[in-house]
Amino acid sequence: MLYDFLLINPWIYDFSAYDFWLRPYGLLYIGGKLRKLGYQIYYLDLLDPFYPKLPKLPKRKEFGIGAFYKEPLPKPVYFKDIPRKFYRYGLPINIFKEILSSLKFKAVLLGSTMTYWYPGLFTLLKFFSENYRNLPLYVGGIYAKLEFKHLKNFIETNLKDTEVHIVNYEVEDFLAFLQRRYEPSGKPYPFDYPIFDLQTQIPYVILFTSFGCPFRCPYCASFRLQPSFIEKSPHQVWEEIIFWKTNYGVKDFAFYDDALLFNFENRLKPILEKIIEEKLEVNFHTPNAIHARFVTKEVAILLKKAGFKTLRLGLERVENRFDNKITLEEFLQAISYLKEVGFSNRELGAYVLYGIPEENWEEVEKTLLFLANTKVPPHLAEFSPIPGTPFFEKAKLSSRYPLEEDPIFHNNTVFPSFKKPPWEKIQYLKQLSRKIRHSLIGK
Ligand code: B12
Ligand code: SF4
């Protein structure tokens, strides 16, 4: 069969990657829009943990999360000093080639996520440019938006004879462009939901109730990716949940919102009330942290009743805070409400951002101990410098890498903000965090 578009989610080359509700939402979203316009699309998820021909199926856990299939790779020379192993996550190359050999398509759409994950994308770009002459390639996603120049430079240097378009503008404009260029070869699909149903399995579905964030934390790129705050109607989100639950039996849903609880009254509240009223049996998760400031008693009750099973809160630091998202009192208040309404230690968690430029490691330790006292499992989150943010400018000054030249060095595992990362201290903090988690939830 001849497809109009082949959509590909690239491999990840990294020290670690885990399917903690990790899906390329933007690419799946575009797939949904194209299908509704009548285009025949094929979705190739190179991270697919369920692909039946994988040499070994990776371990999966409850709520749809789990490991990706991975193969060890030699560590890149510039990361020789990093005390970790390096992998390619996703389908083996021979399986990728085998799948491709059975497909025919008019153009390829490639997604991208973390800026430092571009090697997966580059491998694909090179592959198509070498093996498929005259095939148009379209690249979009977070890396393409944040590192437009880097991508453009690679294309101009290495893919001179290939037609590659970088899509760092509005999706609607891109869809209009495709419509002018390609005649749809199928019938319009009745829905435009993201194409989760084209995956081998649907372990969970990602939801957004809003795009963008009204805050401006100094380390975050949210405003660069989505400058305005756009809210969906509660009804729209409710219908989406019902669609996946009724037609595909999906039980687990993860919210990717940057500010899920912001404007709670008008957005999330009506959705949760409807879920409770209809006694819908679903589990909700927030891998992207929620704001403790907005957790009132009422919010806590509704979250619990509606079926939230994983709640991650952003904490960052107990002293010398570098953002103004929340105060410590607000955090403690939120936790007490959440525990009061019945959330267990296992269901709660707080992100502690560390490894920022000029890090004060004692403060990180204090924060972990504070969480131990408060009985909230800590999750250390290594800082990744993101171009266009104030912390990126700081990181540039203190880094041992040319952060501006090559996004590969944004990788949070390598602690890019330091001339010499204090690996022993880091190891100690990771162990401490693990120990506290273990004492609170037994894992
Ligand atoms: C949800 C989320 C997560 C989730 C899931 C990750 C995922 N699948 O993206 C979780 C919680 C697991 C996560 C983890 C982390 N994240 Co995160 N995450 C996000 C978040 C909030 C949303 C991503 C998203 O889906 N956006 C919505 C979709 C619709 O946008 P989009 O993909 O860009 O798609 C649009 C366009 O780009 C375009 N498009 C997309 N693909 C394609 C393809 C084609 C062909 C075309 C034409 C167009 C196109 O269409 C879409 C519609 O406009 C972003 C911030 C943000 N607001 O985007 C941060 C973000 C990507 N994360 C970030 C970071 C730092 C992290 C962590 C390192 C944090 C930490 N310290 O632990 C970890 C690392 C994860 C890992 N190593 O595995 C940074 C990126 C850093 C970087 N250097 O690139 C961001 C930008 C946030 C920030 N701090 O500024 N994250
Ligand atoms: S609240 Fe979260 S998403 Fe919003 S700017 Fe701060 S870190 Fe980014």
Image (cartoon, grey):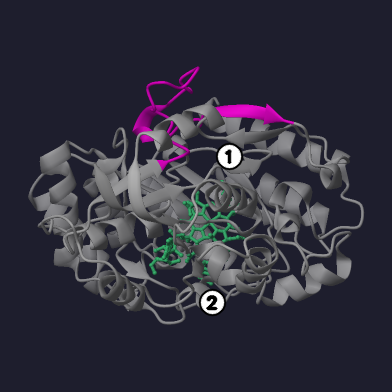
Q: Residue at x 37, y 28 (%)?
A: 62
| In the foreground, 34 or 201 | 34
Q: Is residue 72 left or right of residue 193?
A: right
Give the residue at mark 1.
17
Quadrant of the image occupied by residue 245: top left
Q: Residue at x 19, y 51 (%)?
A: 241
**x and y percent of residue 342 in the render?**
34, 42
**As drawn, 207 above or below 389:** above
User: Disc 2 residue type?
Assistant: Arg
Which kind of residue does numbered mark 1 sit on?
Ala
Mark 2: C-beta under 8 Å from nearest atom of ligand 1: yes
The secondary element bearing badge 1 is classed as loop
Residue 176, labelled with which disc? Answer: none
Judge left or right: residue 70 versus residue 76. left
Measure how far apart labels 1 and 2 are at the Cα level. 24 Å
Residue under the image location 81 percent in, 53 percent down: 361
Residue that badge 2 annotates: 224
Q: Is mark 1 within 8 Å of ligand 1?
A: yes
- Relative to residue 138, is residue 73 depicted above or below? above
Residue 67 magenta-highlighted: yes
Determine the image quadrant of residue 44: top left
